[in-house]
Amino acid sequence: MVWWPLLFFLLPTYFSWIGPCLTFFIKAFPFRWIEKFHLLFLLVTCLLLLGSLFFGEGIKGAHRWLSLGMGIMALRIQPGEFFKIAFILSCSQFFTKGHLWAIKKKILFFSFNSLGLLILLKQPDFGTFFVTIMLFFLIWILSEYSKKLLWALIPLATLGILWALFSKVYRVERIIAFLNPWEHAKTRGFQIVQSFLALANGGLWGVGLGNGHEKLFYLPEAHNDFILSILGEELGLLGIITVGTLYFIFFISGHSLVKRIKNPTGQMFCAIFFILIMLQACLNMMVIMGLAPTKGMALPFISFGGSSLLANFLGLGLVFSALKDKNSVTSI
C-alpha cells in the first residue's frame, strides 16, 4: 500500500494543526468560567473511558482506545490522555476551593475520579493510573490542606500500587526483563535491547537524520513510545541532550508563569500541568535508557499519538486561559 507510509506524516501534521487551534479556542474563554464545568469535563472523560472499556478497540490485550469511524480511516482516541487533564483540573479546584463545596459536590468529585482510576486499572493502563495517583498526592502536598491524612495515605497507596503491579503476570515479566533485558532479548526484553542498539549506533553525533535502521521494523513502537531511541540513533547523544534541554526550558518557562496567575485554581493547575509534561518526558527517557521498566508512555509533543498531542494542547489552552484571567474571584 503506497499510502501507508504517508500516514505517519499526515496524521501528526493533521493533529499539529488542530492542537494549536484547540489551544487558542480554549484560551478565548475565561478560566473562572471554565472551572465551573470541571466536574462535567471529568464526567465526560469517565464516560469515554467506559466506552473504550466496553466498546473500544482491543490492542495487545488493552482496551484504551475508542474508534470513531469505520475501517482503515477510523480515528482512534485514547480517553485516558484527556482524563489526566480533567483529573488535575478537578483536583486543583478541590484543593484550592473544596472547603466551600457542598457535600453533594464533594461526593461527585470523589465518585468520578475513583471511577476513572478504576477504569484505568481495568483497561489496563497502569502507566496513566500511576501518573494520576502521583499527581493527586503532589497537588495535596502543594496545597494548604492538612497533611496529617496525607502521610497516612501514602503508605496505603504505595501498597495498593505494589499490589496492582504484581497482581498481573505480564507486569512481573516486564520487571524481570527490565532487570536483565539481555536474557529476554527475544521476548519481553526485545524492545529495550533494540533501544540500546539504536542508542549505541547513534553514538555522540548520530548516523544522520533519516539514516537510522532501527525504525525499519526492528524496534516496535518506533514512531510512538520509543521515538526518542530513533532520535538518539539519528542525532546521537547530543540530539537527546537537546530534547531534554528543551523540556527543561519548557518546564522552567511554565513555572515562571505561575506567579502571574491570580486565580488559585489556575495557579495550581498551571504548576501541575508543567510537572505532568516533565514527568512524562522523564519517564519516557528513563524507559528508553533502561532505567525504568518498559511502559506505554508517550513522549509529550513528539510521539505519534494524536490523543496525547491534543490533550497537551488542551492543557496549554487552560494555562493561557488562567494566565489572561485577571479576576481572582471564582464562583463555586
Image: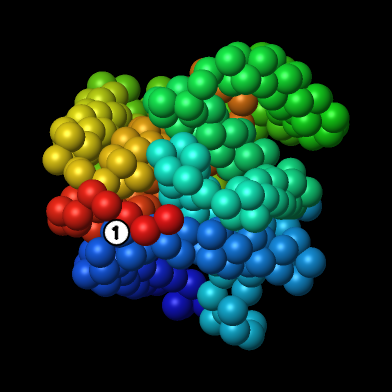
Residue 328 location (% of width, % of height): 23, 49
State the image quarter where residue 29 is shown: bottom left
In the rendered view of the protein, which quadrant contains the C terminus?
A: bottom left
User: Farthest residue toward the bottom?
Assistant: 70
State the image quarter where residue 63 is shown: bottom right
Relative to 101, residue 178 above or below: above
Relative to 176, residue 37 above or below: below
Relative to 48, residue 130 above or below: above
Residue 127 location (% of width, % of height): 61, 38
How many numbered tags mark residues here? 1
Residue drawn at 51 percent across, 21 percent down: 146
Q: Secondary structure at mark 1?
A: helix
Q: Residues within 10 Å of mark 1 (few under 14, many from 20)?
A: many
Residue 199 location (% of width, % of height): 40, 27
Is 163 on the left or on the right of 115, as rendered?
Answer: right
Residue drawn at 64 percent across, 60 percent down: 46
Residue drawn at 54 percent across, 81 percent down: 73
Residue placed under numbered mark 1 in the picture: 31
Q: Is residue 8 visible?
A: no
Q: Is residue 114 visible?
A: yes
Is 88 on the left or on the right of 74, as rendered?
Answer: left
Q: Nearest the camera: 285 or 144?
A: 144
Residue 287 location (% of width, % of height): 52, 28
Q: Nearest the camera: 100 or 201?
A: 100
